[in-house]
Structures are given as C-alpha cells and as structure tokens.
Image (tube, rainbow, N blue to C red):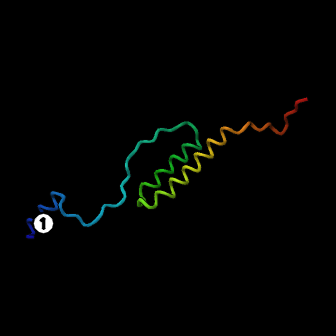
C-alpha cells in the first residue's frame, strides 16, 4: 500500500492498531437522596476504565452494598440507650 493509500485508509477508519480500550459510557447518574445508595452507585464509575473481566468485581461490590442498604431499611429501629418505658 502506498503512503497516499494508507493515509486514505486510516482516514476512513479501515486501518486500526488493535482493539479499542475501555471507554466510559457516559451514563448520567441521578442522585437518589440516600447517601449510602449514592456512594455505591458512584462506585460503578470505577468500572468505566477497566477491561470487561474487571467489571465483575466492581459489580459484585456494588450489588453487595445495595443489598446491605436494603436490608438495613427492613431492620426494626433500635431503641435509644436512655429510653425509659415505665
């Protein structure tokens, strides 16, 4: 391939040096108003710069944290240490 033809091919995107690396999807995250949940959802951004095989660890960590937050909502309130019910 001549230099001129190679330049045209690169301009058309036909020639590539290899597979593209991880690229952020640019998904906009809306705050939930619950600080714990928002912190776990913000952790999802860590997966943006990892290869696909690194996503699992981040997703499992976020899933675990969100499950803990939901479980905490189901727990009965703990009475205060000075509550006197007599």
The residue furthest top is: 86
Left or right: 84 as drawn, with respect to 59: right
Q: Quadrant of the N terminus?
A: bottom left
**Residue furthest to the right:** 86
- Total of numbered circles in the picture? 1
Quadrant of the rendering where the C terminus is positioned: top right
In the rendered image, residue 25, in percent from the top left (x then y), is placed at 37, 49
**In which quadrant of the rendered view does residue 15 lie?**
bottom left
Quick check: 25 above or below 20? above
Q: Residues within 10 Å of mark 1 (few under 14, many from 20)?
A: few
**Residue 9 placement (x, y as % from top left):** 13, 62
State the residue at coordinates (54%, 54%).
Answer: 60
- 11 vs 79: above or below: below
Q: Position of residue 80 (x, y in %)?
A: 80, 37
69 relative position to 6: left or right: right
Q: Pick whichever, 46 or 52, lies toward us.
A: 52
Q: Is residue 18 toward the left or the right of residue 79 in the image?
A: left
Element at label 1: helix
From the viewer's side, name the closer residue of 9 and 75. 75
Comparing 22 with 82, the one in front is 22
For label 1, the residue is 6
Left-right relation of 9 to 85:
left
Which residue appears at 65% of the width and 38% of the height? 73
Residue appearing at x 54%, y 43% in the figure: 38
Residue at the spot 45% in from the left edge and 55% down from the top edge: 47
């Amino acid at each position: 391939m001549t230099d001129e033809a190679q330049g045209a091919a690169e301009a058309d995107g036909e020639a590539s040096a290899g597979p593209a690396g991880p690229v952020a999807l640019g998904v906009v995250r809306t705050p939930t108003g619950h600080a714990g949940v928002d912190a776990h959802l913000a952790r999802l951004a860590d997966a943006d710069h990892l290869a696909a095989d690194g996503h699992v660890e981040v997703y499992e960590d976020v899933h675990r944290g969100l499950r803990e937050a939901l479980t905490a909502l189901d727990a009965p309130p703990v009475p205060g240490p000075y509550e006197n019910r007599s």
